[in-house]
Amino acid sequence: MTAPASTQTVDLAARFPQSVSADARPGYSGFIVKKENLVEVATAIRDEFGYDLLATVTGVDYLAENKMEVVYHAFKTTGGAGLTFKVQVDRVDPVEVPSLINVWAGVDFQEREAYDLLGIRFTGHPDLRRILMWEGYEGHPLRKDWKEAFFEEETKPFKSRWPDGKFAFAEENNPFRDNLKFPADFDPEAYQPETEEDLYASLERHTLKGDGLNTDHIVVNMGPHHPSTHGVLRVAVNLDGETITGLKPVMGYLHRNHDKIGERNTYLQIIPYTDRLDYFNSMSNNFGYVVTVEKLMKIPVAERAEYIRVIMAELSRVQNHLIFIGMLMNDLGTMYTPSLYAFEERELILDIFEAVSGARMMCNYFRFGGVVRDIPDFVLQKIKDLVYDRLPAKTDEMERFLNENEVLVARLKGMRVLNAEDAIRYSVTGPVLRAAGVPYDLRRAEPYSVYDRFDFDVALRHDGDMMDNYLIRFDEIRQSLRILEQALKQMPEGPINSQKPQYQVRVPAGEAYGRIESPKGELGFYVVSNGKPNPYRYHVRTASYVNLQALEKMCVGTKIADFVALLAMLDIVMGELDR
Amino acid sequence: MENEKLSLPNYNIPEDLENVVAITTLDRLYNWGRRSSVWPLMFGLACCAIEMIAAQASRYDMARFGMEVMRPTPRQADMMLVSGTVTKKMLPAIIRLYNQMPEPKYVVAMGACASSGGPFKEGYNVVAGIDKFLPVDVYIPGCPPTPQALIAGMIKLQEKIDKQSIKKVRWYEKGRVDANYVPMPILGPDLIDVRRNAEIKQAAATRATQESA
């Protein structure tokens, strides 16, 4: 790990001696805040200490200590290490923690997620509903005493799978022979499903009033099966005529229980699961996860592997942005042609991924301390051909075809997306934030891996309209190509992993929050280890999920037709959004 | 792929009438028309959907097999490509879409998740295979299947269509209007498959006695 170790730059305990104490558990860092003073301390963190961007909120269930902990990670958009602070509450029913929604609007969905999966009630949250599971679902799955229907053992590898002649299917232990679990004395015929009244009631929160006309509002549900929602996202839109007066994303249609499965898995077994988070960029996801675990393990990364990692991550950024441009054109009505051009280039990059890792999309390529295989020479030559010749030419070509197009310019220019202030308030990261004029790129703000060795500019645009959001993707492709050129030149020979290949890694007890600049924004992993082969808590902070919070702000007041384009600007991907 | 040509073999058609006249059976004509224009439902669930798009794009070009016309509405679709993890929350929507598709309709389970739950099978929100609810015609292994594998699966489906007979297919059977109607599951404390209500009730009662004992 070449990135500077996360140092506590502020002493919160000195500022609030009564209510804040440093977290003294071995392997842990940050501060523990008393529940009663949380809002006060958080406000000071934001206003006095300048941590304006709250990256994550998540909960940890310490069952043995009978505690629930809520962990916050705040960062400065000017860069540098973050500030971790926590609240501990007794594990009694109901677990209540004050909501920080009035301090950082970006805690909205993340608090709802913690409520849904851990049962932590955030008092003062205006819209505390389940978010990933449906209303009426029994239990809070991430609690440590909650067992899924196919529960076999706490952690993998399952003893029943040892090759000693004993072999069991999870189905055999379940009365339904299926992934089902019902409370005692449940009567399905008498059951009344929960309605969605709360959802529709919450839509009226932003109702625009006072245009004099006494018109009815109508609710339009877009999705979960809708061509413009980039997957199985559902958005309930409240309309006054064609104007959006309220909007709520409804998600969880691809909630694949990443966190819960991750906690059962060993550290190494998680890597292929991270591939399936943002399925366009499996290399970036691997990167974020291994960076986090390496932080915990405190191991160095082989020099050559660092460069291979950067090359793979940047290639995946290039193809992600190409796809973004193609898909945006689809959403704007230029059906297929631009996206076919984009897919042509993407296939060439996927060929490289396939050659190095064996899989086109789900690469599973990174390991703790390095990568799994070296790049063969012919692949290196392919990468060089792409980076030096083909991709710059094709990017130029795409720009030439599209950027001057009158229809496109008329559609995109001047259509507001987000201003800088709102973007930070809603914890938006990635290209959307940079298009609004905030030069916040983790490759610069808190360099990880070897990004501090490359000469590149943080892509930046200032208007924050759709045109800027679109053009910044081209800027980023060019900067990525710049990094790729340097990485290819500087890449040393040598081993590709600093560790011996192993099936089980030792991770000392403690916690770590690792983050990288994924193509869609900040991708963070929060891992708590208790020294066992499996993580105690494993949480993913994905850019799509957190960025989506701003959608309501972006869309209210615009027309329904703009919603599709605005959603496209966020560049969400459902695997990452629902996890 | 023996039925690719419309004409039956062993009929001598004069050379100047080739491509103008075909001698064939009704079954063959019917199947030939359907197998050459399988319109998939434009419907992506997860990672597999991206490979489905890649298969539609220029390099793999599924249009060669008459399958490029993705219909966003189920009313116009012949085939549902279940491309990705089926979650409990999504399942009612999938079943509603399936019920809205007119016969003849086919279901292709693309990838490990749609076939069996795949790597996410143990997840509490994951349905272990769409075949628990819908009749699946072709399973395509892979995580995700490459576009080549997807196309191979589609060709398997075409072969299946080739073998069908107009006399036996379920959608022309008398008195079976809703031959393939699937009752909507309900999202309760867990996914309630209404066809298994009695079983659920019994298991819940058993659990109650176990817990009180």
Image (cartoon, rainbow, N blue to C red):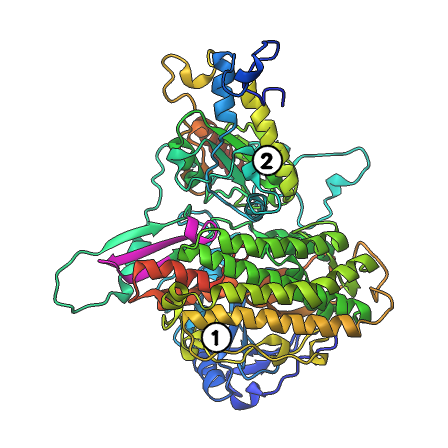
Q: Which residues are magenta?
A: A227-248
Position of residue A454 relative to residue B68, above or below, is below
Quadrant, the N terminus of chain B: top right
Instruction: Give the percent coordinates (x, y) of residue B69.
Output: 47, 39
Which of the chains bears the disc numbered 2? B
Numbered disc 1: secondary structure: helix
Position of residue A463 relative to residue A554, above or below, is below
Circle 1 residue = A435
Circles 1, 2 touching at the beta carbon (< 8 Å): no
* Horizontal side of residue A380 vs B152, given as left or right: right
Instruction: Give the percent coordinates (x, y) of residue B57.
Output: 56, 47
Label 2 CA crowd tier, 10 Å (few <14, some 14–19, many 20+): many
Circle 2 residue = B115
Q: Amino acid at mark 2?
A: Ser
Please report the residue visible at 19 percent of the width from the left and 68 percent of the height from the top.
A209
* Horizontal side of residue A264 vs B88, given as left or right: right
